[in-house]
Image (tube, rainbow, N blue to C red):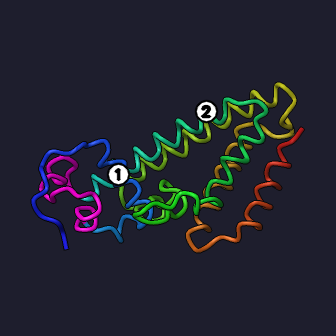
Amino acid sequence: MARTGRPREFDKDKTLARAVELFWSRGYGATSIQDLVDALAVERGSLYGTFGDKRRFYLDAVRLYWDVYERHLITALDTTPLLPALREILTHPARLDELISDVGTPHGCMVGNTSAELVPHDAEATQVVTHSYRRFTDLVTDALRRAQSTGEVTDSAAPEAQAQLLLYVVQGLSLVSRAGLDRAAALSAIDTAIDALRA
């Protein structure tokens, strides 16, 4: 049952960050407006007035998720040596139990989940997902190019192709993790991918 008597004023940024956790753990379709009202302790009218409908709220949450992820990605890729940082990035879906909150356990990558739920029939969601994937490959390509120049990463393939392969690995792993994950097998596969990049 929803609580009553909540003030209309609330912190928009904190509310959106909290919504990321809820949408990430349950998905778009399985999260109702009432779920959001209850979990975020905000009046229904305040949610609609601030964020619009559920779809708009969800896409704002996905954008925030990506913004936070990209900041972490940039920091990770700006380290030397690069390969241990790449391994850390790829193992993220295999460590989801470390991210449990009181609203649930996240499942896979929120961008990948959006692709599975809303793409391609939602043009705006498709744009958000496409932008996120492009940013991933662009940032990883730049990092791999630098690592090739220092001799850490093999130059037997173009860095663009290597980055695209890593996108497929991390998104494939994220998708599989939604159905349950054999952590040992996942980490072994990631190590194989990383070893293939070594000079």
- Against 84, is 56 above or below? below
Residue linked to disc 2: 75
Three-letter code, disc 1: Leu
Name the quarter where the N terminus is drawn. bottom left
147 horizontally vs 107: left or right: right
Where is 106 relative to 88, above or below?
below
Give the residues drawn in magenta, as a range. Answer: 33-53
For the C terminus, the quadrant is top right
| Disc 1 from disc 2: Cα separation | 25 Å
> Residue type at mark 2?
Thr
Query: Which residue is nearer to you in this view: 175 or 79?
Result: 79
Residue 36 on the magenta span? yes
Instruction: Name the image quarter holding residue 58.
Output: bottom left
* Most common secondary structure along the magenta stretch: helix
Is 49 within the magenta? Answer: yes
Residue in the image at 68% along x and 51% along y:
90
Position of residue 118 in the picture relative to residue 46 (left or right): right
Q: Is residue 40 left or right of residue 138?
A: left
Residue 87 horizontal/vertical position (percent): 73, 47
Please tell me whether residue 2 is drawn above or below residue 5 in the rendered image: below
Vertical placement of 61 versus 31: above or below? above
Secondary structure under tag 1 reads: helix
Question: In the picture provided, is 82 more to the left or to the right than 113?
Answer: right
User: x and y percent of residue 39 in the render?
Assistant: 29, 62
Determine the residue positioned at 40% across, 64% down: 103
Give the labeled residue for mark 1.
59
Sequence-wise first label, 1 or 2: 1
